[in-house]
Amino acid sequence: MNGSGTLDAWVGRTIGVARLPTRDDIDAYQLRCLNETIAYARSQSPFYRLRTGWPEPCELVDLRDLARLPLTTADDLVRGDPSLIALPMRDAVRLVTIPTSGTLGRQKRLFFTEADIEATVAYFEHGMATIVRPGSSVAVAFPAQRPDSVGDLLMRGLTRLGAFPVALPVAGSLDRMVDALRELRPAAIAGMPVTLGAAARRMEADGGPPLRIETALVSADSVSPSFKAALAVVWGAEAFEHWGMTETGYGGALACEAHDGLHVRETDLYLEVVDGSSGRALPAGQEGEIVVTTLRRRGLPLIRYRTGDRGCVIDDRCRCGSVLRRLRLGGRIGEPIVAGGGGRLPAAIIDDAIFAVDGVIDFSVELRTGRGARLAVGVMAAAPRTIVDVRAALLRHPIVGPWLQAAGIDLAVERVSGPPFSLCRKRRVTVVCGED
């Protein structure tokens, strides 16, 4: 499979170039789309029409001019007054509500038109063509029962590609999903890291027949080195990371065979990186908060939307030959744990350290701060010995061990004996504030 050629050729057709696009072709297309989006949003969206702080004139001469425009935040979506929606509600084919952390149950509401859905299906079709052969069976480990859900859209894109997608029973037990995988014996699989990691480790531990999977699309959460290693050992699978969120129309950026950043969906998104504190635009290669502007969306256009994800954009040409810009991810803004003398410790480091222990199927982590601070790890594992191994691995880890000691945090590792964890979830460190 020539992944870079497949995706770049589709980008060229989409932006109206009858050949493989150059960087200049894509920049010109994006500048034109940005000016159209800004003019449309300011005339049709109540939020952007009433927004102050627009430079006048507002037409961009250069892509860098976008940095002069005000930023849009998740709180703007949550409030919805004035609304960001730029079309009558009757034009929506899908409405999505997303709970937000720290907003006392308030939700973001996303609006999708038929054209938005079609753009996502087309991206999934051509993006998956870089890692899946036509005629291959593909296990989809995302919820797919609801029409126009991410799992449903991915399956529709795979079907157009000529592959044979099958939805796994992710709402049931882990053993049921593993049984379905062994029956299907797919060439590829797609899902969240927690879902795929648990399935691979369960297969490794249950004594059943082994399974070989060529490629794995991993999306919707951070991907640790130990997770990638587990998929390679258990299934022989090469993991391809994908970044996206509901606000981007699910698809956003996809890794290629070079595994040196994720190629951005530049047909529909323009990405910037800004300083998380000041909002100042940062140069290519410098890490900050990822900011997204939609290029073709008419139902709910977003201009300079702060995603809450960290990363940097890479401008130089990829080793795979693609001219598409690449995104390197750095986790969520505000995700690092802060604990006194222990300093800042990214949650991803704890995740990687725990899953690197053989026998760990799934786990949860809770940090209690204040007096009697404690890091509590609940581990799903087939063998009791795994609990001892996890504790030892954390204490001797070159970063986690000194952090625990410096912050005076007690470590408690227990085997999970209650109801199993949800298969489709993002793994987060729960922070409980105790008394000081």
Image (cartoon, helix red, strand yellow):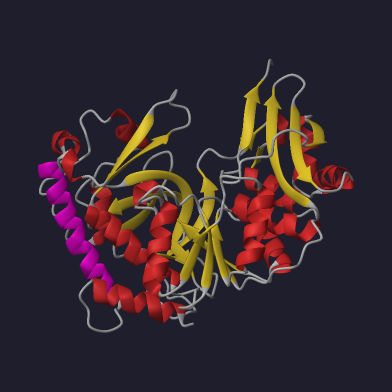
In the image: residue 174, left or right of residue 308: right
Q: Position of residue 218 (x, y in %)?
A: 55, 59
Q: Is residue 346 visible?
A: no
Q: Is residue 25 magenta?
A: yes
Q: Residue at x 35, y 35 (%)?
A: 108
Indicate the quadrant where residue 78 lies.
Answer: top left
- Is residue 213 depicted above or below 367 in this figure? below
* Vertical relation: 254 (above or below) 24: above
Which secondary structure is most common in the magenta stretch? helix
Residue drawn at point x = 76 percent, y = 28 percent:
374
83 in magenta:
no
Residue found 30% across the figure and 73% down from its top? 11
Which region shows up in magenta? 23-44
Q: Nearer the viewer, residue 176 or 412?
A: 176
Residue drawn at x 73%, y 65% is 234
In the picture as drawn, the residue positioned furthest to the front comes out as 183
In x, y percent, where is residue 400? 75, 44
| 91 versus 432 height, above or below | below
Question: Where is residue 7, by image quadrant?
Answer: bottom left
